[in-house]
Image (tube, helix red, strand yellow):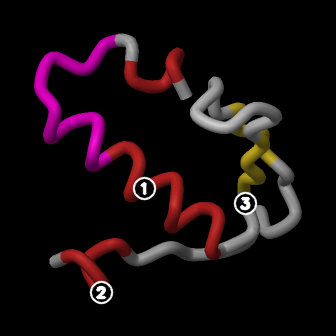
Amino acid sequence: FDELISECEHGLQIVARFLALLELYRERAVTFEQPDPLGPLQVAWTGENDDAVIDFEEDYG
């Protein structure tokens, strides 16, 4: 996750990327792992649902 937000200049960009990750998780396109409480959040692409069409406008527009 640190790599995904490294270029963010504002807190709102970090929040938007995290919400996008949650949406991808809901669609089973990524998994999360956090071995230690409050430790680094590891995100991995599963490729399980590559054909999914994700419409962010539906939920956030």
Circle 1 crowding by C-alpha within 10 Å: few under 14, some 14–19, many from 20 = few
- Element under label 1? helix
Q: Rounded to the nearest whole Å, what is the CA distance between mark 3 and mark 2?
A: 18 Å
Q: Which residue is mark 1?
A: 20
Residue wearing tag 2: 58
Dominant secondary structure of the magenta stretch?
A: helix
Of marks 2 and 1, the one in the foreground: 1
Cα–Cα gap, marks 2 and 1:
13 Å
Q: Which of the two discs, 3 and 1, labels the residue nearer the N terminus?
A: 1
From this view, report whether residue 54 is shown above or below residue 29: below
Q: Which residues are magenta?
A: 7-16
Question: Which is more toward the observer, 61 or 10?
Answer: 10
> Which residue is painted at 77% across and 52% down in the image?
31
Residue type, numbered disc 2: Glu
Q: In the rendered image, which residue does mark 3 sit on?
A: 29
Q: Quadrant of residue 5?
A: top left
Horizontal relation, residue 15 to residue 29: left or right:
left
The reply to whether the magenta stretch includes residue 10 is yes
